[in-house]
Image (tube, rainbow, N blue to C red):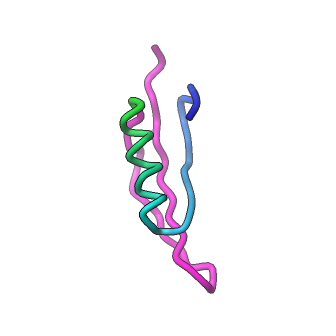
Amino acid sequence: MSDLRYRFITGPDDRSFCERISAALDEGYQLYGSPTLTFNGEKTIAAQAVIKEPK
C-alpha cells in the first residue's frame, strides 16, 4: 500500500475487499467512521475510510 495518512477503500462487497481492509489494518491503519454500502444495479459496492497516524 502506501504511506498516505487517509485512504478511502472501495470495491465490490466480497472477500477481496475484506482482504484489502485487513491488509490496511495490518499496516497500521485504523478504521475511520462507519462502512458504507451502495448498489450499482449489478453488485453491492462497499467503502471504508482508514487513517494512519504520522510517524
The dominant secondary structure in magenta is strand
Give x and y (percent) for residue 41. 63, 86
Quick one: quadrant of the C terminus? top left
Is 11 drawn above or below residue 41 in the view shown?
above
Give x and y (percent) for residue 1. 56, 35
Give x and y (percent) for residue 10. 56, 57
Name the one closer to the observer, 3 or 51: 3
Which residue shows up at 47% across the image and 68% down it?
13
Is 6 drawn above or below residue 46 in the view shown?
above
Which residue shows up at 38% across the image and 39% down it?
25
In the rendered structure, the answer to whether residue 14 lies left or right of residue 3 reads: left
Furthest toward the bottom, the residue is 41
Which residue shows up at 49% across the image and 48% down it?
49
Which range of residues does the magenta coloring cover? 29-55
Residue 37 magenta: yes
Give x and y (percent) for residue 6. 54, 36
In the rendered structure, the answer to whether residue 2 lies left or right of residue 13 reads: right
- Residue 27 location, quadrant: top left
Which residue shows up at 56% across the image and 48% down it?
8
Number of numbered discs present? 0
Residue 36 magenta: yes
